[in-house]
Image (cartoon, helix red, strand yellow):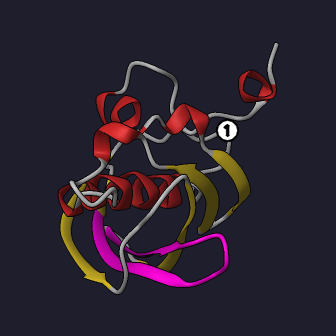
Amino acid sequence: MSDVDERPLFLKPGHHAGDLLESRQWLILREERGLVEVEAHLPEHLLNPRDQLFGGFTGTYVDMISIWTVRTLFGSNQSFKWSATVNMRIDYFAPVLGPRFKLRGELIKDGRTTCLVATHFEDLDGNKLVYAITTLRKSD
């Protein structure tokens, strides 16, 4: 069994967005209540003609990290049913280049029915690439 097979997975294969981003290959750096950090790779099929992350796919990464961050609010004994993204704002500072980069999701506000999550994209040297704010409606 390889190291990749032994890592905890954010999503098992079979989730369309996770499969598109190849999230099963992400390295989980940190996961705690209201915070997740991963090192991700940039799949070739997500590149624009300049070999950068195509901007249209950025929101998919943001959505995945935001949902994962909200999921950390539920203990292992509680079931996480679903959440729905109701708003997302993305600010681009620099292109996301491969082969690897970091993603961090931070809970900003845990409200009664919604959560506000910040998602950070950084290169491996810590340079800020993308910042996003997402509002998610929590499951009933």
Instruction: Give percent across and percent down for residue 7.
Output: 75, 33
**Amino acid type, residue under disc 1 in the picture:** Asn
Q: Give the image quarter of residue 25.
A: top right
Instruction: Give percent across and percent down for residue 68.
Output: 49, 52
Q: Tag 1's secondary structure?
A: loop
Q: Residues within 10 Å of mark 1 (few under 14, many from 20)?
A: few
Residue at (72, 28) in percent of width and height: 4
Say left or right for 105 vs 96: right
Say left or right for 55 vs 71: left
Q: Give the image quarter of residue 132.
A: bottom left
- The residue labelled by disc 1 is 77
User: Magenta includes 132?
Assistant: yes
| Residue situated in front as seen by the camera: 60 or 125 | 125
| Residue situated in front as seen by the camera: 119 or 138 | 119
Instruction: Give percent across and percent down for residue 92.
Output: 29, 81
Say left or right for 28 vs 15: right
Span of residues in magenta: 114-136
Q: Quadrant of the N terminus?
A: top right
Dominant secondary structure, magenta = strand
Q: Give the image quarter of residue 118.
A: bottom left
User: Magenta includes 75?
Assistant: no
